[in-house]
Image (cartoon, rainbow, N blue to C red):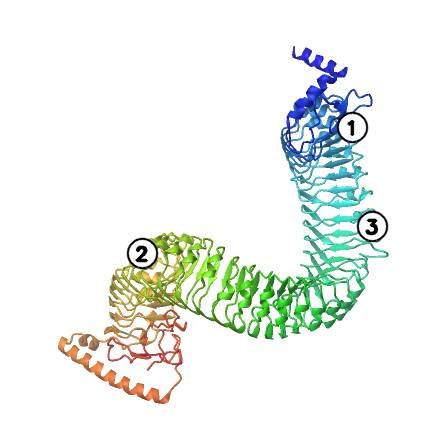
């Protein structure tokens, strides 16, 4: 019954029943969404052959063409289209149609062109497409089609154009494609095809254009490709093809375009390619080709583009590369292993417009014959080993637009002749060894958009006529030796977007004309000697996103720098800015870095900083901020660095810090914080450095500190902490610096500290009330360089295991109750390392003898008398010596553990606090006053030790 019904429909259509055709077309219309009204005249009342997009046969009985290309249609393709059996052309391309390609289109036996490209069609290619025996053009690319290409495609024997590009097709290319004897164009690029290119492709003898770039084809190129003698274009770029390039490529005599970039081809470039006399473009870049280059334009007379970049080619450029009337205009050889003279073999390439020899091993100097390349517009010689100076003849290459010479070893000055290059828009000389002044003639290059001189030795001032460069977009002069003021004319470079003058010797104020740089987005002036106040005119620069003025001498308010609501990074550290943080800064909600440390800012930390939800780095250290740390900072969940040290902040360490899961560095040291260390700190699992020393913290060290398993540095010294050292600290196995000194910690030293085998810089537990014996496990800290256990109540013998600390060069066990002999392995340390332990003997202290043992049995009264006598005598001697020293005004010197004359082992480490930023800390005799005597009593053999804090930062040992 279904067959009979279909036959009746077919007979009716064959006899030209216009009513039925009209009904079908109106149903087809209903499947489209026609927002532009292009189908408005498709009505029952009008003649079919007058409907938009339709073409009828000469006798007006059949529809032979339906062209609705680029009409803004959406909807789907109606299966009823399959009933228009006289259709010869169906073009629905460049619309927004979706859904599948109906299999019913296979009924269009007369169809010659099917154009469905540039829609949003999905699904696969119906196998019924193979029924279209008259089909010549099939273009269905740029859709969402997927799956494999049906083998039935090989039945379209008359197919000339097959376009399947930019879809999601996968699988192998069916070998039946080789049956398409009349195929002239095959475009498969931009899919997910894989497998090998079938040998059967050689059957497409009339193929002229084969493009299969950006797929996953693998294996080698079949030698049978030589049978595609009509090929003019072969593009197999960006696949996974491998093996040697077949010499048979040289038999494709009609080839004009050959692109095999981005594959895995190896071996040499076959010399047979020289036979391709019609070749215009050859791109073999981004493969693994090796050997020497053996190509010549003597045979490749039409070659214009030669691209061999990013291979492993070596040797020199052949002298016969350009012979006769060479048409070579674009030569790219970057990223190989070429060597020898930089332009050897290329001087005859007089037609060159672009030359890229970068990232090779070329050496020697740039030859003066460079001006023979008179048409050259782009010259890239960067990342080689070039020496010598830039020849003045460069000024004769007047078409030059790009000159890139960075990362070589060029010396000498910039030739003044460079000022002739009026078309030059990019000059990149960074990371060379060039010197001398920046020639004023450079400012004649009025087309310049980019200048990059980073990392040279240029001296003298920035040319005062820089304002002539009206097209300048970026100026990079960082890391030179430029001096003098920033020229006011820079403000007239109206298009300037990036200005980098950091790491020079510039001085003077910032010119007010900078306020004219309305497009400026980045300005870095750090590490200069610039001074004065920031001009108010800068407040109008609304596009600024990155500002770095750090390490200068700027003064006054920072308000002119916060007028932009687009700030991302603001770094003003190490200046003398004063006043409060301006409220206008609240508008820059995209801030990721706010660094205002080492200034004279005051007031309270503004709560609006909590609006910076992307803030990564906050540094307000070394200022004069007061008040509490605002709770609004808890909203800055991306913070990795929070530095508020060296201020006058009060209140408690906020518990909300535990919510900053990305935090890697927290420094709240040198403030007036009080209360206990919050247990929530243990939730900062990314924390690497925790410094809250020099505050008024009390209570015990919370065991939750042991959760900070990424911690490298823990500094809690100089607080009022009490209780034992928590055993949980054994989990801090990445710790390399631990400072708990000058607290009121008690109890024994946990043996588990010996598990912290990464401890290297310091273990400082001094000036507490620790008791018990020194755990032998401390000897397991084999990387440790400094150990300070002084000023505690430790007893027992010094463990011999400490002798295994071969990296140790600072040791202080003084002022405890240790007894017994000093292990011989520790005899390399001076006496000061062990003083203040009455029962301790052995080198470098006195020898252990029976007399010493008897002395230890003296009555308490005798012992007390001796102690009093020692204290009195030591005090008198010390006062006399102080008087003598102050008279002599001697130069204090720091002492080292390796000294042979008994110098004190402990070297000051920057860890204490003073508002000038000069930190001080010492193992022995720490004090904040200019002259402070050590309080604890020592044995009769000890020396009197003072801490002297005068103009010199060195220690004095008396």
- Comparing 918 with 85, the one in front is 85
Residue annotated with mark 1: 158
Left or right for 400, reference 804:
right
Q: Earlier in the sequence, mark 1 or mark 2?
A: 1
Placement of the N terminus among the 4 image quadrants: top right
- Figure check: 170 above or below 681: above
Q: Earlier in the sequence, mark 3 or mark 1?
A: 1
Residue annotated with mark 2: 678
- Give the Cα separation between the discs numbered 3 and 1: 34 Å
Q: Nearer the viewer, mark 3 or mark 2?
A: 2
x and y percentages locating residue 214 in the rendered image:
66, 42
- Give the Cα separation between the discs numbered 3 and 2: 77 Å
Residue annotated with mark 3: 302
Placement of the C terminus among the 4 image quadrants: bottom left
Residue at disc 2, secondary structure: loop
Left or right for 663, reference 28:
left
Classify residue 846 by image quadrant: bottom left
Left or right for 572, reference 708:
right
- Give the Cα separation between the discs numbered 1 and 2: 81 Å
Residue at disc 3, secondary structure: loop
Q: Nearer the viewer, mark 1 or mark 2?
A: 2
Left or right for 357, reference 553:
right
- Figure check: 886 above or below 262: below
């Amino acid at each position: 019954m279904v067959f009979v019904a279909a036959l009746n429909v077919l007979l009716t259509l064959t006899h030209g029943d216009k009513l039925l055709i009209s009904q079908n077309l109106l149903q087809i219309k209903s499947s489209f969404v026609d927002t532009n009204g292009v189908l408005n005249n498709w009505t029952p009342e009008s003649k079919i052959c007058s409907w938009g997009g339709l073409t009828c046969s000469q006798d007006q009985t059949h529809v032979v063409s339906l062209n609705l290309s680029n009409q803004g249609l959406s909807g789907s393709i109606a299966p009823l289209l399959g009933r228009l059996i006289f259709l010869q052309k169906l073009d629905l391309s460049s619309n927004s149609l979706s859904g599948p390609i109906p299999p019913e289109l296979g009924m269009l036996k007369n169809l010659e062109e099917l154009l469905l490209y540039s829609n949003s069609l999905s699904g696969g290619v119906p196998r019924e497409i193979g029924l279209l025996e008259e089909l010549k053009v099939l273009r269905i690319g740029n859709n969402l089609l997927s799956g494999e290409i049906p083998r039935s495609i090989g039945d379209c024997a008359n197919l000339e154009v097959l376009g399947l590009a930019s879809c999601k097709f996968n699988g192998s290319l069916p070998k039946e494609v080789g049956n398409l004897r009349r195929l002239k164009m095959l475009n498969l690029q931009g899919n997910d095809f894989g497998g090998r290119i079938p040998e059967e492709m050689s059957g497409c003898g009339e193929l002229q254009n084969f493009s299969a770039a950006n797929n996953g084809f693998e294996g080698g190129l079949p030698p049978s490709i030589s049978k595609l003698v009509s090929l003019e274009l072969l593009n197999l770029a960006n696949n996974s093809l491998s093996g040697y390039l077949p010499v048979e490529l040289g038999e494709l005599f009609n080839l004009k375009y050959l692109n095999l970039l981005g594959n895995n081809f190896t071996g040499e470039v076959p010399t047979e390619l020289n036979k391709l006399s019609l070749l215009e473009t050859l791109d073999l870049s981004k493969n693994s080709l090796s050997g020497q280059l053996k190509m010549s334009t003597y045979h490749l007379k039409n070659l214009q583009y030669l691209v061999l970049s990013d291979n492993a080619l070596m040797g020199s450029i052949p002298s016969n590369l350009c012979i006769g009337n060479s048409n070579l205009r674009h030569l790219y050889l970057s990223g190989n292993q070429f060597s020898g003279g930089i332009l050897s073999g290329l001087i005859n390439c007089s037609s060159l417009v672009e030359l890229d020899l970068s990232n090779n091993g070329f050496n020697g100097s740039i030859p003066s014959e460079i001006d023979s390349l008179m048409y050259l517009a782009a010259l890239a010689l960067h990342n080689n080993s070039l020496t010598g100076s830039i020849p003045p003849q460069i000024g004769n290459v007047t078409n030059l637009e790009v000159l890139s010479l960075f990362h070589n070893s060029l010396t000498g000055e910039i030739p003044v002749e460079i000022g002739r290059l009026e078309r030059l828009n990019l000059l990149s000389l960074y990371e060379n060894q060039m010197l001398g002044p920046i020639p004023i003639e450079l400012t004649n290059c009025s087309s310049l958009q980019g200048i990059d001189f980073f990392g040279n030795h240029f001296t003298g001032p920035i040319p005062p006529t820089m304002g002539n460069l009206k097209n300048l977009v970026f100026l990079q002069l960082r890391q030179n030796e430029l001096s003098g003021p920033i020229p006011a004319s820079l403000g007239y470079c109206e298009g300037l977007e990036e200005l980098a003058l950091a790491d020079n010797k510039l001085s003077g104020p910032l010119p007010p004309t900078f306020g004219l740089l309305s497009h400026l987005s980045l300005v870095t002036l750090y590490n200069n000697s610039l001074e004065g106040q920031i001009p108010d005119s800068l407040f109008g620069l609304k596009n600024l996103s990155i500002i770095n003025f750090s390490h200068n001498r700027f003064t006054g308010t920072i308000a002119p720098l916060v007028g932009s609501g687009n700030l991302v990074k603001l770094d003003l550290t190490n200046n003398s800015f004063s006043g409060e943080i301006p409220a206008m800064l609240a508008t820059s909600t995209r801030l990721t870095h706010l660094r205002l440390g080492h200034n004279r800012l005051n007031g309270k930390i503004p709560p609006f900083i909590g609006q910076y939800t992307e803030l990564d780095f906050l540094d307000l250290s070394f200022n004069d901020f007061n008040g509490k740390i605002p709770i609004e900072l808890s909203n800055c969940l991306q913070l990795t660095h929070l530095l508020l040290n060296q201020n006058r902040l009060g209140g408690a360490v906020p518990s909300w810090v535990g919510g900053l899961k990305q935090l890697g560095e927290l420094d709240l040291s040198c403030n007036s914080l009080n209360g206990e260390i919050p247990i929530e700190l243990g939730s900062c699992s990314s924390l690497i450095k925790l410094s809250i020393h020099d505050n008024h913290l009390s209570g015990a060290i919370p065991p939750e500190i042991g959760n900070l398993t990424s911690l490298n540095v823990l500094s809690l010294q100089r607080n009022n902490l009490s209780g034992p050292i928590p055993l949980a600290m054994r989990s801090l196995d990445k710790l390399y610096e631990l400072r708990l000194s000058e607290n009121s910690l008690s109890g024994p030293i946990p043996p588990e500290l010996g598990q912290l085998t990464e401890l290297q810089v310091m273990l400082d537990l001094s000036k507490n009330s620790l008791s018990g014996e020194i755990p032998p496990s401390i000897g397991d800290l084999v990387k440790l360089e400094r150990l300070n256990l002084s000023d505690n109540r430790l007893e027992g013998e010094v463990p011999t295991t400490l002798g295994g600390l071969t990296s140790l060069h600072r040791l202080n066990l003084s002022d405890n109750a240790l007894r017994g002999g000093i292990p011989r392995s520790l005899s390399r340390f001076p006496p000061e390392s062990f003083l203040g332990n009455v029962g301790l003997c052995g080198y470098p202290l006195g020898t252990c003898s029976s007399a010493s043992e008897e002395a230890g049995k003296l009555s308490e009264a005798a012992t007390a008398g001796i102690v009093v006598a020692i204290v009195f005598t030591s005090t008198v001697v010390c006062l006399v010596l102080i008087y003598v020293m102050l008279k002599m005004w001697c130069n204090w010197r720091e002492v080292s553990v390796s000294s042979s004359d008994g110098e004190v082992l402990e070297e000051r480490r920057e860890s204490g606090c003073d508002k000038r930023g000069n930190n001080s800390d010492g193992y022995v005799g720490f004090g904040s006053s200019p002259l402070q005597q050590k309080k604890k009593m020592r044995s009769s053999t000890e020396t009197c030790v003072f801490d002297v804090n005068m103009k010199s930062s060195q220690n004095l040992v008396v």
